[in-house]
Image (spheres, rainbow, N blue to C red):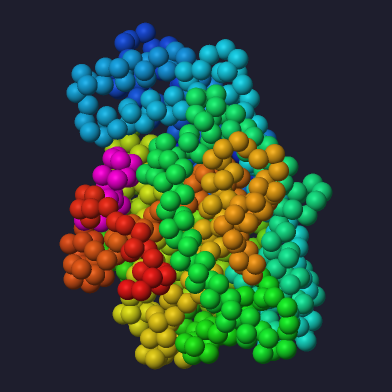
Amino acid sequence: MSNPILSDWTTPFEIAPFAEISDDDFAPALEQALQAHADQIAAIAANPEPPSFANTIEALEAAGEGLSKVLSVFYTVAGADSNPAREALQRDFSPKLAAHFAAISSNKALFRRVADLWAQRDDLGLTEEQARVLMLTHRGFVRSGAALQGEADARMQEIKARLASLGTAFTQNLLADERTWFMPLSEDDLDGLPDFVIDAARAAGREKGADGPVVTLSRSLIVPFLQFSPRRDLREKAYRAWTARGANGGETDNRDIAAEILKLREERARLLGYENFAAFKLETEMARTPQRVRDLLMQVWTPAKARAEADAAVLTQMMQADGINGPLEPWDWRYYAEKRRKAEHDLDEAALKPYLQLDRMIEAAFSCANRLFGLEFAPLDVPLYHPDCRAWEVTRDGQHVAVFIGDYFARGSKRSGAWCSAMRAQAKFPKVQRPVVINVCNFAKGDPALLSYDDARTLFHEFGHALHQMLSNVTYESISGTSVARDFVELPSQLYEHWLEVPEVLAEFATHAETGAPMPPEMLEKVLGAANFDQGFQTVEYVASALVDLAFHDGPAPADPMARQVEVLAEIGMPHAIGMRHAAPHFAHVFAGDGYSSGYYSYMWSEVMDADAFAAFEEAGGAFDREKARALEDHILSTGGSKEAEDLYLAFRGRLPGVDALLKGRGLIAV
């Protein structure tokens, strides 16, 4: 019998046939796909013809279709709907995949062909896009260690395999801690909580099989609990559990894993001739050097810390007025900040939330994409990997553009956070393929599901990534969609968040869950007026994490990452009442893989651009100016990694921005 993963998919738009795939299919499909890809690579390397762009670079682009199918399906379900069988498979797959790709990057015959083409690049008559793909392919081989010989080569393969296993272990330990911890709540413990938090806690209790409501470590539940619960003891218990993820001792403790990862990354960088891992990692980003990253972060840190300290003084006074002496603690901040927001802006999250229905916010994201780019979204009835998932066909002028899948609700089988991935990326070679894009979030379930304003911003953020994938229009998959510099990839997503704050968008789509009435104008004004509320806190918790990430990689690897974390926070004067957004043992951005390692700063680097890019719309004639939207699509959303990120932004805006636009956007300096 043929394996359903590797067979031809006859489903609508060739979406993976999830209903036909069982966990038993993954291992044999992977083995078959790995062997097929290895055979293709061997044939390219051994080709007796002189190397050409077609028989080497394009051949590499065309290879591995079966492997792409296996990995797209497996890693979708492993991240969003895991189970013990899938976790075991992930542990087994990681070193195999690392060894497979390491064998490709260390294939000397293959590298010689690529290097020969690179040496002849000016005489090959390549298009601009082909020249870019050749450069990226050659650079990728070199940075993977293809030029290493002997012991150095062998050691590089060992390091890659070990890092892959460690990253998987880090992720699974974190998921285990998040899945197993919950705090039961009695009916008395619910006092003071708004209905939407109580409903979410009851839904979480049912999902956990508990007798009543519970608080879990899902951000969409624990953050509102910390905002609204008057029970300081319960807030402390929940906060300590949340920040202890990955550091609870025993089999799921991530601290030794983090230390080994950092040590291996440093060794990897030194084998390639770099001083440290940060220098290696940042070489291909817009920032280029650790010093430029540090300069940006410190330009933001100073005003953010000043704002946070001023806010802390106000919140401490509020706490003392409640008869609580002693310092403001991290589990107090959100509670008193919410009280302050209600007092100063007369904005009550509990009153606001019924206006932010999940379905209406999805409609809002779709509507903005229609007005900006002419995209239409029609529901699709297709089997997906979980009943919570939904799918839409995306069209423009009647032509198929993409399939978009949304998986929005938190559950124990899903890792925390929110992300976007392409189950199939856009390409025109070796055949035309349109993307299948998925947004995964962790919102609290409800009937109807209601979002916080931060949740709604997350929805728009991830949909911005989806647009980057859906509107991609390049020839080669390796430079398609979000295949761009890490500190550029967040530009489309963070830029799209701005459309949530356009008054006419909220006026149309922020309608009450029970009455259907639009958000009252006075509430809308308060929402927009409070957009920068508590930015000192939010900026400090983020920048502290980014600075710690940079310190981990810019210099010798710390033997004790936790001690180094403490040192960095002391050096920058971290306010006592604010915790890092991601401490080392649960810093999945940095330790679950290399993606954001030495690169967590990327969100802020992109924010410098997104504040300036949205200003371009306002200057041109408004948020829905079609000419500016066309320029955004032509120069950024459709181009993938076909050019340097700096050149793409310059083509769109005509200049590079300074940090002032970001500081003004966050309300950290006077406008």
Picture coordinates of residue 486 (x, y %)? Answer: 43, 46
Look at the image and say whether residue 642 sits in the magenta stretch. yes
- Answer whether residue 657 is visible to the viewer in this image: yes
Q: Is residue 409 left or right of residue 412?
A: left
Residue at x 21% of width, y 58% of height: 630
Residue at x 22% of width, y 26% of height: 126
Locate the C terminus and report the quarter of the image it occupies.
bottom left
Query: Quadrant of the rendered structure where residue 197 is?
Result: bottom right
Magenta region, main secondary structure? helix
Q: Is residue 283 left or right of residue 308?
A: left
Picture coordinates of residue 426 (x, y %)? Answer: 35, 44
Residue at x 47% of width, y 14% of height: 108
Locate the N terminus and report the quarter of the image it occupies.
top right
Q: Residue most toward the top?
A: 48
Q: Is residue 123 left or right of residue 536?
A: left
Give the total of numbered labels: 0
Query: Quadrant of the rendered structure where residue 137 is?
Result: top left
Picture coordinates of residue 214 (x, y %)? Answer: 73, 73
Segment colored magenta: 631-649
Residue at x 59% of width, y 79% of height: 313
Picture coordinates of residue 341 (x, y %)? Answer: 52, 84
- Relative depth, front residue between 602 and 116: 602
- Answer whether residue 22 is visible to the viewer in this image: no
- Relative depth, front residue between 509 and 608: 608
Look at the image and say whether residue 480 sits in the magenta stretch. no
- Relative depth, front residue between 223 and 53: 223
